[in-house]
Image: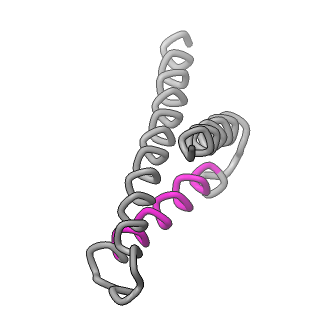
Amino acid sequence: MALPFVMMMALAVFAVQLVLCFKARGLWAKLLPLLAVAAADLLCWVVYFGGFWADVYGAAFAAFIYGVVLAMILALDGLAWGIWGVVKLVQKRRK
């Protein structure tokens, strides 16, 4: 039931990252989606491994699931950077 939402979120992050890689001027603007997803992923793993909110039923399981989903989205973000790098490499070789 949540898979379509996760897929739409992943595709949205991929598309936004790809557009920012090609259109944004500053490095910080290009890195913004990557840093946001990485920070959220790190927070999830800290909650999971740190034992915070251990008295809340299901918090560790939810942090694990969100951490895995955000890691997949982070991989798609890296794929967008890879596409951008290949395009820039091809453009540089053509000159």
Q: Which residue lies furthest to the bottom in this view?
A: 55
Residue 75 shown left or right of residue 12 in the figure: left
Q: Identify which residue is drawn at 37% across, 77% down.
A: 47
Q: Residue 36 at x, y = what percent?
A: 56, 61
Q: Identify which residue is drawn at 29% across, 83% down.
A: 51
Q: Residue 29 at x, y = what percent?
A: 66, 54
Q: What stretch of residues is rendered in magenta? A: 30-46
Q: Could you tell me which quadrant the N terminus lies in? A: top right
Dominant SS type (magenta): helix
User: Is residue 32 located in the magenta-colored stretch of the structure?
Assistant: yes
Q: How many marks?
A: 0
User: Is residue 3 located in the magenta-colored stretch of the structure?
Assistant: no
Q: Which residue lies furthest to the top in this view?
A: 94
Q: Identify which residue is drawn at 62% across, 44% down.
A: 5
- Residue in front for this viewpoint, 58 or 83: 58
Location of residue 4 (image quadrant)? top right
Residue 25 shown left or right of residue 36 in the figure: right
- Residue in front for this viewpoint, 36 or 66: 66
Say if 64 sits above or below 71 in the image: below
Q: Could you tell me which quadrant the C terminus lies in? A: top right
Q: Identify which residue is drawn at 48% across, 66% down.
A: 39
